[in-house]
Image (cartoon, rainbow, N blue to C red):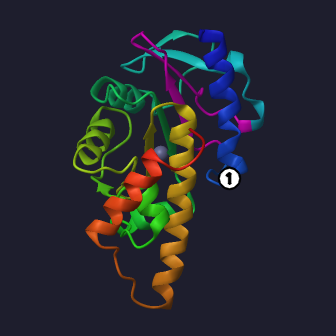
């Protein structure tokens, strides 16, 4: 099962550059190992095209390596903190994608002005506190901000995006959708005022998307 998860997480990492969400070696993805206090995460500082299933690092939920030859992503402690405090989450993605991070640089949440936002995020995409990389401060900020919101994405102030999902694919999807709506709402705002959707509309859209949309 661990071998399968290494393969899945490695393959899904290709979605980050493919969707234009990362520059150079920035960004990362992880998956919780089902039934264990472990996760599979990207190694630190390796170019995306050089990632292999074997180069993925298995860490405990404090970000300490337990298996693998390479050092884990410098965000491993943050991913671990999120898994420890959000048992419903089994995938975490992190990017500095341009438009979403521009909103983060301004410390401004993305208002829910699109049906796609109501669908995916169930409201605005919130801003989390500024925190320095390394300790548990970022994880704390992510968990605290997401607990107060229905969103699966959070814009960490002056840093970038963290997204969560029921698995790594869902976390990547949230990162792709977050950047997509960040771009659209930014462009809309350069054209003039934008108006948030009403609470009832957001509720109806979110419910339909989460419970009815797609193949069942
Ligand atoms: Zn970062």
Residue 77, position in %: x, y?
39, 27
Q: Report the side of 202 relative to 192 (left or right).
A: left
When the figure is inspected, residue 153 is found, relative to residue 117, above or below; the finding is above
Work out whether 107 lies above or below 86: below
Q: Can residue 159 be seen in this view?
A: no
Q: Is residue 86 magenta?
A: no
Residue at the spot 68% in from the left edge and 43% down from the top edge: 15
Q: Residue at the spot x=48%, y=74% of the render?
A: 185
Q: For mark 1, give the secondary structure.
A: loop
* Vertical placement of residue 203 versus 210, above or below: below
Residue 94 picture location, percent across and down: 50, 43
Within-10-Å neighbours for mark 1: few <14, some 14–19, many 20+: some
**Residue 165 position by quadrant:** top left
Where's the C terminus, which quadrant? top right
Residue at the spot 45% in from the left edge and 57% down from the top edge: 119
In the visual, does 116 lie left or right of 43? left
> Does residue 200 appear to the left or right of 101 in the view shown?
left
Q: Residue sitting at 71 percent across and 37 percent down?
A: 48
Residue nearest the observer in this picture, 139 or 169: 169
Residue located beneath label 1 in the image: 19
Q: Residue 38 lies in magenta, yes or no?
A: yes
Residue 67 placed where, x, y %? 56, 8
Is 131 located above or below residue 44 in the figure?
A: below
Instruction: Look at the image and tell me in which quarter the N terminus lies.
Output: top right
Quarter of the figure with residue 162: top left
Residue 83, quarter of picture = top left
Q: Nearer the viewer, residue 181 or 102?
A: 181
Please name whichever residue, 169 or 80, is drawn nearer the observer in this view of the structure: 169
Residue 139 seen in the figure: yes
For ligand 1, tell me if the residue under mark 1 lies within 8 Å: no
Residues in magenta, as a range: 25-48
């Amino acid at each position: 099962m661990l071998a399968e998860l290494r393969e899945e997480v490695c393959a899904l990492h290709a979605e980050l550059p493919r969707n234009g969400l990362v520059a150079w070696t920035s960004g990362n993805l992880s998956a919780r190992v089902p039934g264990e206090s472990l996760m599979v995460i990207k190694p630190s500082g390796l170019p995306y095209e050089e990632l292999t299933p074997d180069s993925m690092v298995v860490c405990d939920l404090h970000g300490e390596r337990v298996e693998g030859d390479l050092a884990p992503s410098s965000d491993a402690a943050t991913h671990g903190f999120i898994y420890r405090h959000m048992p419903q989450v089994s995938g975490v993605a992190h990017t500095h994608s341009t438009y979403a991070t521009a909103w983060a640089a301004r410390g401004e949440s993305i208002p829910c002005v699109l049906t796609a936002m109501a669908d995916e995020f169930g409201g605005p995409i919130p801003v989390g506190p500024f925190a320095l990389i390394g300790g548990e401060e970022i994880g704390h900020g992510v968990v605290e901000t997401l607990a107060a919101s229905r969103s699966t994405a959070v814009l960490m102030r002056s840093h970038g995006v963290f997204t969560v999902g029921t698995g790594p694919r869902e976390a990547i999807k949230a990162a792709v959708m977050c950047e997509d709506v960040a771009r659209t709402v930014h462009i809309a705002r350069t054209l003039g005022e934008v108006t948030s959707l009403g609470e009832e509309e957001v509720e109806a859209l979110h419910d339909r998307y989460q419970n009815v949309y797609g193949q069942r």
